[in-house]
Amino acid sequence: MSLLRRCLAIGVLMTAGAQRGRAQAADSLTADQRTAIDNGRLVFLTWDVGGSPWPRACAYQHIDAMPEEAAAVFTNYDRHLAFIPKLRKSTISRVIDPVTAEVDYTLSVPIVADEHYTVRDHLSTYNGGASYKIDWTLVRATSTKATEGSVRFEPRRSDKTLREGTLMAYCNLVTPGSRLAKLSFIRSKAMAQVREAAGAIVVEVERERAANRALLDAEIRTLRSALLAQLPHAAGPDSF
């Protein structure tokens, strides 16, 4: 794609994103919680959900990187195994379209057997293309009944450091199938896994930005290509 066509395509993408604008993740946080995030702490919130022994859990944390960089790292699903704790497998098993893929995972679970599951991930942008969101839903699993969640990467300037960066909102709701899931020990482990996964994403994004720019640049190129491929005629020979 020529430079002109690429610029036009990005412009269309940003316009489409603006039309799908939504509230920022920070809007759901209190002033004290935003201050905690600016001070480098992870804010962890849960909400009970009827019909599930586990609550919906959300982890909010600042990332010293841009939203595009964070989204690029996360959407390299095959590498989740390299940095998310307790994972034994992360493999893209099916590509639905450039922004949608099914990923096979194996998670080490205490007491019971390892959990094998597949989720469908979908990448999108919003707020004028400045923010990124990946949604996931369960396709199949060894015992888990349902899973739905998302991670959002939104631009945010730290009130403390005055540096531009990203607010990550990592949320997940799992409806487990095991009868042992109601045990407080198992529930606590499940909530800890959400916290650990969120923290690991932050660490990996910042690590790649500081120490593995070649990998990060490759991930960004893949992210941009996926989004551009979703635009009408973006990759065609007569585009624009």
Image: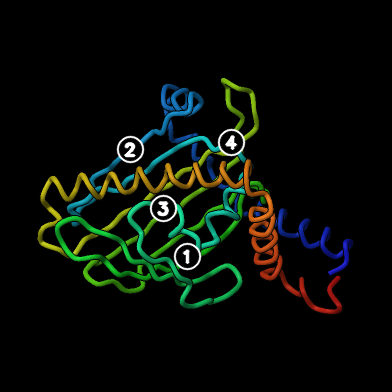
Cα distance between the residues tagged 3 and 1: 16 Å
Q: Nearer the viewer, residue 139 or 87?
A: 87
**Looking at the image, which residue is at 64% across and 58% down?**
219
> Which residue type carries mark 1?
Asp
Which comes before the other along the chain, label 4 or label 1? 4
**Looking at the image, which residue is at 32% across and 45% down?**
57
Mark 3–mark 1 contact, CB under 8 Å? no
Q: Nearer the viewer, mark 4 or mark 1?
A: 4
Mark 1–mark 2 contact, CB under 8 Å? no
The picture places residue 208, in percent across and down from the top left corner, at 59, 47
Cα distance between the residues tagged 1 and 2: 23 Å
Which comes before the other along the chain, label 3 or label 1? 3
Secondary structure at numbered mark 2 = strand
Instruction: Identify the image quadrant of residue 222.
Output: bottom right
Which comes before the other along the chain, label 4 or label 2? 2
Cα distance between the residues tagged 4 and 1: 24 Å
Mark 3–mark 2 contact, CB under 8 Å? no
Tell me which colouring the rendered structure shows. Answer: rainbow
> Which residue type carries mark 4?
Asp
Q: Which residue is mark 3?
A: 84
Mark 3–mark 4 contact, CB under 8 Å? no
> Which residue type carries mark 3?
Ile
Residue 64: assigned label:
4
**Looking at the image, which residue is at 64% across and 60% down?**
223
Q: Nearer the viewer, mark 3 or mark 4?
A: 3
Q: Which residue is mark 1?
A: 121
Q: Nearer the viewer, mark 3 or mark 2?
A: 3
